[in-house]
Image (cartoon, rainbow, N blue to C red):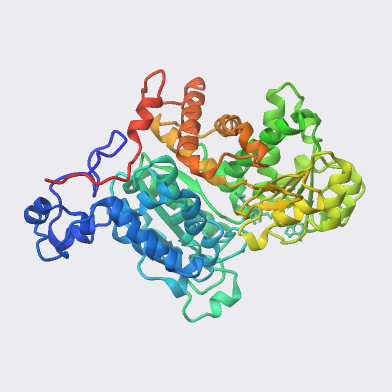
């Protein structure tokens, strides 16, 4: 077994004495299946428990790949991969690494959306911890049930805003499980270090509550003080039981997400991927797109559809980026406009008071009801969809963007694919191929007028694995917005002129390991600059970080 990549003691899977016999075969971190050598079979009590022929990892990869490709639907492939992950993680991650472009959409968006919707039906075996509000008063005890004592990365959701699919309650577990798999596949976090957690406080999804096979607590969401007390106890328990863990808040509803991040940042090294990770990937895409339009940040007018975690997170990071280039903050904020479910976000809008996170972007303007009206009034250079509302970037709106701009920038970031504000095809067709386009979930290439455009995937997978890995490697005391900005800049710089020529404003997913390493190095540099690093690394940490990555290869146990 590879030594754990951080300076830890042993974890449950960390070293000898190895479990023997069937206990070894059912330990997914150690199991090699048919690849156990003759010597290992004799020494570890495996003789007879496996068919006689010994296979190499490469031969196993080719067999599982063939089996996977014979499955007809993405959901069947998801189930197949989950089962493989539960059986043999080395083989699972070898497949993930070698076929990243094919595998990431299967274990993450868009397939994970379908998997969450059907999590109850496809549930085979639990992965991660389900902590329900009934466990109030003993959350630390529940955390101690996890078999690994040295957890370093926790991804936690309460299932209230799963992708653009809304409240899925306990079924949201697919998201933390998938994100942790990406931490390993993309950045090289050792799989033993990751802990997926779902906090179950009930669900406001009436159809789930009425479903007899629903896996979670079938009552309305607990809110208010009881919810806050539950979260506070959870945070305190994490600090007590896993003091070295970094925590990623994931897919919380926006009434809680901003608050939880602000309240807990000072006491727990944590970040919210929907707010900060999305922001970094979108700003990176914008910076790469500006290389094509020859524009600069200060000259843009950004119009967002959706004023939630993703939208205002992106705007905040745009403001930080523009300020760092010398633009006054107020001027940068004035460049960002939002349309939410009630129309253009403006100061003194009649109706419900604006949520706190929208106030910095509520400018003086007459109220407008629709996105089309807002496009006319604001004449944006950049249109960003983060509303979870499909087909809202209509052909007319896309055509108008192309009339207003020689190279309009359009990001349809809502996930999964079914929720995207427009398809890649619509974006290219309606702008005669002039658009600089990115989507949250992948779309196939589009051929138009003899040219093929490969749309970029503006997905957080480019950001959080590298940021988290870098922060863990240097023992960052805090994850700052400056780290996300550094990651965004580095990501944009990794986009090649060949990518841009294909219409792609992100690097190919096949480069995700390299990309994540580069971002981790950028985060380490940022942490050092701000005095937040607690683990000494060489001046150039590249070799050290490379060596710490989990490699999906088999080790000899005897
Ligand atoms: P959120 O719930 O915080 O915000 C959603 C916003 O959309 C709210 O402001 C709401 O008012 C607005 N909205 C809802 N219906 C609308 C309508 N009909 N017209 C205009 N606005 C409307 O959610 P979020 O975290 O900001 O996520 C939004 C979407 O972005 C989701 O689909 C999510 O999957 C996607 N997202 C993508 C990525 C990525 O990597 N590409 C990352 C994070 C979020």
Residue 110 screen position, x and y as percent: 56, 59
433 horizontally vs 130: left or right: right
- Which residue is at the front of the view, 303 or 250? 303
207 is higher (above) or lower (below) than 314: below
Q: Residue furthest left?
A: 42
- Which residue is at the front of the view, 539 or 336? 539
385 horizontally vs 443: left or right: right
Residue 178 screen position, x and y as percent: 46, 55
Residue 347 in view (yes/no): no
Residue 309 in view (yes/no): yes
Tell me which corner region of the image, top left, top right, bottom left or bottom right, holds residue 361: top right
Q: Which residue sits at x=72%, y=61%?
A: 390
344 horizontally vs 283: left or right: right
Q: Quadrant of the N terminus?
A: top left
Q: How many marks?
A: 0
Q: Quadrant of the C terminus?
A: top left
Residue 357 screen position, x and y as percent: 70, 45
């Amino acid at each position: 077994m590879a030594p754990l990549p951080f300076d830890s003691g042993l974890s449950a899977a960390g070293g000898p004495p190895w479990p023997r016999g069937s206990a070894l075969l059912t330990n997914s971190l150690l199991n090699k299946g048919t690849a156990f050598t003759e010597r290992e079979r004799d020494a570890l009590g495996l003789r007879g428990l496996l068919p006689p022929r010994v296979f190499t990892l490469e031969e196993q990869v080719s067999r599982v790949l063939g089996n996977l490709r014979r499955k007809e639907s993405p959901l069947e492939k998801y189930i197949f991969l989950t089962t493989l992950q539960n059986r043999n993680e080395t083989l699972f991650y070898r497949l993930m690494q070698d076929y990243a472009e094919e595998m990431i959409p299967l274990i993450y968006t868009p397939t994970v959306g379908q998997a969450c919707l059907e999590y109850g039906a496809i549930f085979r075996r639990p992965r991660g911890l389900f902590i329900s509000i009934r466990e109030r008063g003993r959350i630390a005890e529940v955390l101690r049930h996890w078999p690994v004592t040295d957890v370093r990365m926790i991804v936690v959701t309460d299932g209230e805003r799963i992708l653009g699919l809304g409240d899925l309650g306990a079924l949201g577990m697919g998201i933390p499980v998938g994100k942790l798999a990406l931490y390993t596949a993309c950045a090289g976090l050792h799989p033993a270090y990751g802990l997926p957690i779902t906090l179950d406080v009930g669900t406001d999804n009436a159809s789930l509550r009425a479903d007899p096979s629903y896996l979670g607590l079938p009552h309305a969401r607990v809110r208010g003080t009881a919810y806050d007390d539950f979260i506070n106890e959870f945070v305190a328990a994490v600090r007590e039981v896993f003091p070295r863990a970094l925590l990623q808040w994931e897919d919380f509803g926006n009434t809680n997400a901003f608050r939880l991040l602000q309240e807990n940042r000072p006491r727990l090294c944590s970040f919210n991927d929907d707010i900060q990770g999305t922001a970094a990937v979108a700003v990176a895409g914008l910076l790469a797109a500006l290389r094509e339009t020859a524009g600069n940040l200060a000259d843009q007018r950004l119009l967002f559809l959706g004023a939630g975690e993703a939208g205002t997170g992106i705007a905040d990071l745009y403001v930080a980026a523009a300020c760092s280039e010398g633009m006054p903050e107020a001027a940068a904020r004035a460049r960002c406009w939002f349309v939410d479910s009630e129309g253009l976000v403006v100061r003194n809008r009649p109706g419900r008071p604006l949520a706190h996170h929208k106030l910095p972007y509520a400018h003086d303007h007459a109220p407008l009801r629709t996105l089309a009206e807002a496009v006319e009034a604001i004449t944006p250079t950049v249109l960003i969809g983060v509303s979870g509302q499909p087909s809202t970037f209509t052909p007319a709106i896309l055509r108008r963007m192309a009339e207003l701009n020689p190279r309009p920038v359009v990001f349809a970031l809502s996930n999964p694919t079914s929720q995207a504000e427009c398809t890649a095809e619509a974006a290219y067709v309606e702008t005669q191929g002039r658009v600089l386009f990115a989507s949250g979930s992948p779309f196939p290439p589009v051929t138009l007028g003899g040219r093929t455009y490969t749309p970029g995937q503006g997905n957080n997978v480019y950001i959080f694995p590298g940021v988290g890995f870098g922060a863990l490697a240097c023992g960052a005391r805090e994850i700052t917005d400056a780290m996300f900005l550094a990651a965004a800049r580095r990501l944009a710089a990794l986009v090649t002129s060949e990518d841009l020529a294909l219409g792609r404003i992100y690097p190919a997913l096949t480069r995700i390991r390299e990309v994540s390493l580069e971002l981790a190095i950028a985060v380490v540099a940022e942490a050092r600059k701000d005095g937040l690093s607690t683990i000494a690394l060489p001046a150039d940490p590249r070799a050290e970080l490379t060596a710490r990555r989990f490699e999906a290869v088999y080790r000899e146990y005897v």
